[in-house]
Image: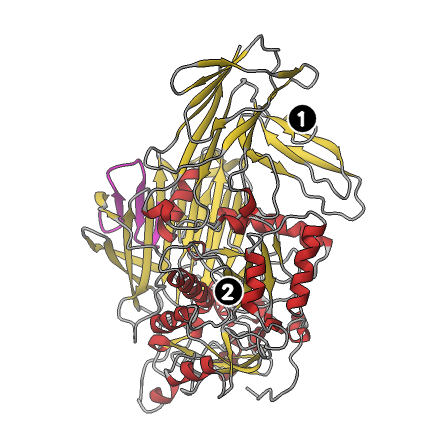
Amino acid sequence: MEAAGKEEISVEDEAVDKNIFKDCNKIAFYRRQKQQLSRRSTYKASLDSATIGKDSTKFRIINETTKVPLLAEIYGIEGNIFRLKINEETPLKPRYEVPDVLTSKPSTVRLISCAGDADSLVLTDGKGDLKYHITANPFKIDLVSEEEVVMSINSLGQLYFEHLQIPLEQRATKENKEDTSADTSQEDQDDLGLWEEKFGKFVDSKVNGPASIGLDFSLHGFEHLYGIPQHADSHQLKNTSDGDAYRLYNLDVYGYKIHDKMGIYGSVPYLLAHKLGRTLGIFWLNASETLVEINTEPAVKYTVTQMGPVAAKQKVRCRTDVHWMSESGIIDVFLLMGPTPSDVFKQYSYLTGTQAMPPLFSLGYHQCRWNYENEQDVKAVDAGFDEHDIPYDVMWLDIEHTEGKRYFTWDKKRFPNPRGMQELLRSKNRKLVVISDPHIKIDPDYSVYVKAKEQGFFVKNHEGGDFEGVCWPGLSSYLDFTNPKVREWYSGLFTFSAYQGSTDILYIWNDMNEPSVFRGPELTMQKNAIHHGNWEHRELHNMYGFYQQMATAEGLIQRSKGKERPFVLTRSFFSGSQKYGAVWTGDNTAEWSYLKISIPMLLTLSITGISFCGGSALLVHPVTEPKASTVDVFLPGSNEVWYDSKTFAHWEGARTVKVQVALDTIPVFQRGGSIVPIKMTVGKSTGYMTDSPYGLRVALSTKDSAMGEFYLDDGHSFQYLHQKQFLHRKFSFLSGVLMNSCADKRGHYPSKCVVEQIFVLGLRKQPSSVTIRSSDGKDEPVAFTYCAQMATLQLENLSLNIGADWEVHVQ
């Protein structure tokens, strides 16, 4: 990599021609798999030698052409999860298996054989109705529920496994050594990228040759699939054509193309399929570059099948085929069998963890742009919010706050008094977020660089020296966050003694951590760079940002001696990133089209574990077109009723309504059958509103009932977890009685907050009286206002403790 010297690095280094990114046809392992699969080589399972153990069932799979054996392992996992691992039986050296993503070793359920011979084997966990039918030749697995095939594995024969090979230079010294590419011309080898893959001016050398894997899954009766973020595309996954697969490869794509399947900043190799009566998930645990093809075959009313001498008519369900391909690693796939959407969400979170409990301030408004110039700029913006009565919680500082883009430092001229600036924010219950990227400026006078270099903490190039690439500071080296010692050291950089000028209101965002390498192949790190454990970058590329966020979050927790919740925003992410903080949808050009595509992008993140968005009670319809005066809003659910949150007008569901909008209005609807708590006053920040009173919006369903929940803790510490200091309350409205009751008796948290107002929507009959019954059984009449035209009931000037049991009787 050429030295950057002192040349200026600008945003133009990011805003580049999209031709520097690969499409599928430029990806060698995609071309190889498509070419080889067209020849239909098959695998056969040796089921007569299958071993059924306590934790797993093992058997060999033999490629009919190469005769090289694979080892398959099948696991039953608690909670209706099925795991399939396929690896080389005797690999030349260990193949990469993704660590650190699973929260713990999953608890296995012993599978037992309920039928089997040399041609087939049927396994069941003995609990549910699910059975695993394994066919020997050709190898196939059918997952059967209630005598119906739900999913088939390798039914299309797309199992693909490239075996590690002896390096070419070693092979040249061994005569008559078997070579799977011996009959391949040099021209074909170059085209298929077997040992070297060329892209532009870059050459990717592969020491042990090609090592890609692939497998197909057929989902019977399913045609609606979701997931595999991150793509700037529709929420429902689309059919792919040749050369147009969904790509999972974390890349810095500034101003990414909309409605495109190219890989951008993050990757979650997990998709969900949904149909009436069943939802399931496929979690492909692989951190190398991955491609996913999807093809839906529509239902056929009748097809003619030959049954002996008689032709019979048979109804054929729709089917969606999903083909996963990864550049390296092993096949390690979890099948989440639901059967409900809620079950699938629980199964995935059981494997990879739940969303980290955020500090309350992080749910407030964040003021972030590139770039605030100095302390005076920050003070002026902060004062402007107060002057215009706009609440906000967090001020953000980008790279210019540092001394020459050296992270963990402050520019002495622009930010001479960072502590004083933070104390100003603290006085208004506000916070500060600053940037910390993974690249470290090569500078012998920069202590972070010097200490990391001394300890060998940087990613290496394939020749053994420190990897060097260009990013914002110029020539930089990249911390190897896959190394636990590097993560431990990096976490220590956030202590107040190490990070001079920082305070406990300072939080972090990790940017450029795909990793972004200006002028590198596809603006990222060479795949043959070397990480801890001597693993090539290609094996774990999609996890690099995951590891930086992990280390950053741990650093903020350690900074507070384990007491305070961290807040870390990351641009690059992987499965399990939800355990460490939040993500965003990357760098766009702030046009209307990006605002619109952000909605399906966020929904997709939400259902794949990174749930910093979504809510079942409220439907928000953002205005995504310029100069709009009306929007058409679809209100779902034929048995639902929806209420306008401002006018309280109501509509039945399963219809589209036209709503007037202006610059200061966004249509928000509350679902009938829900109870939503709201704060009655607005402060300068969330910190100002800790003890302010609540109101309850009770939106009645078509059955005149409603339910809701309320959670409260101190908003910043881990006391909710360690000391059970929280409130979890349940609200219900049924037969004219609104009840506040305890939803979790383990939690206790003293709160001064009261319910000051109750507003009931959809009450079709005027009450004769309203009384409040407290926990001691005393009844007290209360004044009310009823509007017959809008069918609303309003109770004001109440003082009902949010954490106490009470009832409101409407008669």
The residue type indicated by label 1 comes to Phe
Residue 452 visible (yes or no): yes
Classify 410 as above or below 558.
Answer: below
Q: What colouring does the structure picture have?
A: secondary structure
In this picture, is 239 found above or below 780?
A: below
Q: Nearer the viewer, mark 1 or mark 2?
A: 1
Q: Quadrant for the N terminus, please.
A: bottom right
Which percent across, then down, holds residue 330? 36, 64
Q: Which residue is mark 2?
A: 34
| Residue stretch in magenta | 116-142
Q: Residue at x 51, y 39 (%)?
A: 691
Residues 520 and 690: in front is: 690
Q: Disc 2 residue type?
A: Lys
Residue 648: assigned label: 1
Query: Total marks drawn?
Result: 2
Q: Residue at x 72, y 44 (%)?
A: 623
